[in-house]
Amino acid sequence: MKLALIGATGYVGAALLQEALDRGHQVTALVRHPEKLPEHPSLTGVQADVNDPDALASLLAGHDAVLSAFNPGWGVADIREQFIQGSRHILAATKQAGVSRLLVVGGAGSLYVAPGLQLIDTPNFPAEYKEGAEGARQALNMLRDEQQLQWTFLSPAALLQPGPRTGQFRLGGEQLLMHGEQPGTISVADLAVALLDETEQPQHIRQRFTLAY
């Protein structure tokens, strides 16, 4: 497949890039700093700005799917607003480009821990991540209103960490997956496996799903 990957040099994006290339896909990596990308015959690096949706649309055109690992950066003061704005532009640019499939990696904060209660709204949710998690929740809400695209939103387990690619994990839907009394974990490499599996063989069209060990 010919895939456009937004945010390919980030923590999640780099894992998605490696998995996509290992599977033999042609990847266009849309990043702020193409010089940070590795050399690979199936990889084309392109400088892009998600806040220029018209230019972004022209770069996305002709791809089979758009994969987004967009994140403004956890140190950004207005991360919530940047997350919402960037996500809105990616959505608009994908439609303008005529690409029907959009797969987005979001956060675990919008997963439910009880009826009507999302993780982000619990008392012990880390304050330093709340603004970014709220931005990701709003991005998911935008997708839920989208009827034109075949979108998918992937929320990781509560603990997304470095680790090996095992290919062995369980999938869930709207609920936070637990490991006994503790929140579940997943490696960023296995998160990439799940998203590329979904890209190649869609099972969650216009749905959010999650995963954990």
Image: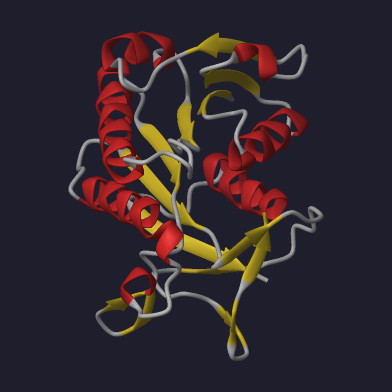
**35 and 169: which one is in front?**
35
Give the image location of residue 47, x and y in percent. Answer: 51, 11
| Left or right of residue 7: residue 132 | left
Residue drawn at 54 percent across, 59 percent down: 156
Residue 173 occupies quadrant: bottom left
Quadrant position of the C terminus in the picture: bottom right
Please name the colour scheme applied to the rendered image: secondary structure
Q: Residue furthest bottom?
A: 181
Residue drawn at 39 percent across, 58 percent down: 208
User: Is residue 102 positioned above or below 195 on the image?
Assistant: above
| Left or right of residue 166: residue 79 | left
**161 and 176: which one is in front?**
161
Give the image location of residue 26, x and y in percent. Answer: 64, 19
Give the image location of residue 6, x and y in percent. Answer: 49, 27
Residue 180 occupies quadrant: bottom right
Residue drawn at 46 percent across, 29 percent down: 65
Quadrant position of the N terminus in the picture: top right
Residue drawn at 69 percent across, 19 percent down: 37
User: Is residue 110 positioned above or below 4 on the image?
Assistant: below
Residue 21 occupies quadrant: top right
